[in-house]
Image (cartoon, grey):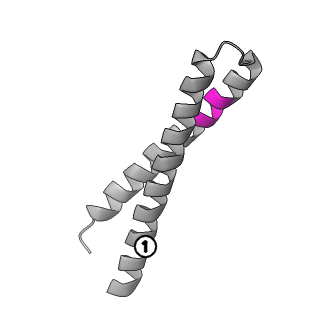
Amino acid sequence: MDIFTLKCIHKLLKDKTEEIQKKKKEAQKLLYELQESDTADESLIKKQEAFADAYTKYYFKLENALHDFENQDW
């Protein structure tokens, strides 16, 4: 791989990590708002918990991939 390819991969990983981090925070915020609401349906809360958990897991996988990529001796 040449340096341009490596830089592109690095940028893609960073951008995707930032995007998923934002979505994770939004999902967690919505979950909190639903949990605090007196009118929220329990099934809706459970679905939002699943979304928040999925974004959190994906975010950590991306963070690990980015960390591994940045620590390589290219």
In the image, taking residue 22 as reference, residue 35 lies left or right, namely: right
Q: Which residue is rendered at x = 52% and y = 33% of the image?
A: 29
Residue nearer the viewer, 15 or 63: 15
Tell me if I can see residue 48 in this picture: yes
Which residue is the site of mark 1?
A: 9
Looking at the picture, how far across and down is residue 27, in whole percent? 57, 37
Residue nearer the viewer, 68 or 28: 28
Is 50 magenta? The answer is: yes
Is 43 magenta? The answer is: no
Looking at the picture, how far across and down is residue 19, in whole percent? 49, 56
Identify residue type, mark 1.
Answer: Ile
Looking at the picture, how far across and down is residue 12, in whole percent? 46, 69
Magenta segment main secondary structure: helix
Q: Which residue is rendered at x = 55% and y = 42% of the image?
A: 55
Tell me if I can see residue 53 in this picture: no
Tell which residue pokes out farthest to the front in this image: 38
Magenta highlight range: 48-53
In the image, taking residue 25 as reference, residue 72 lies left or right, namely: left
Which structural element holds mark 1?
helix
Q: Which residue is rendered at x = 59% and y = 38% of the image?
A: 54
Query: Does residue 41 sit above or below 64 in this rendering?
Result: above
Quadrant where the C terminus lies?
A: bottom left
Quadrant where the N terminus lies?
A: bottom left
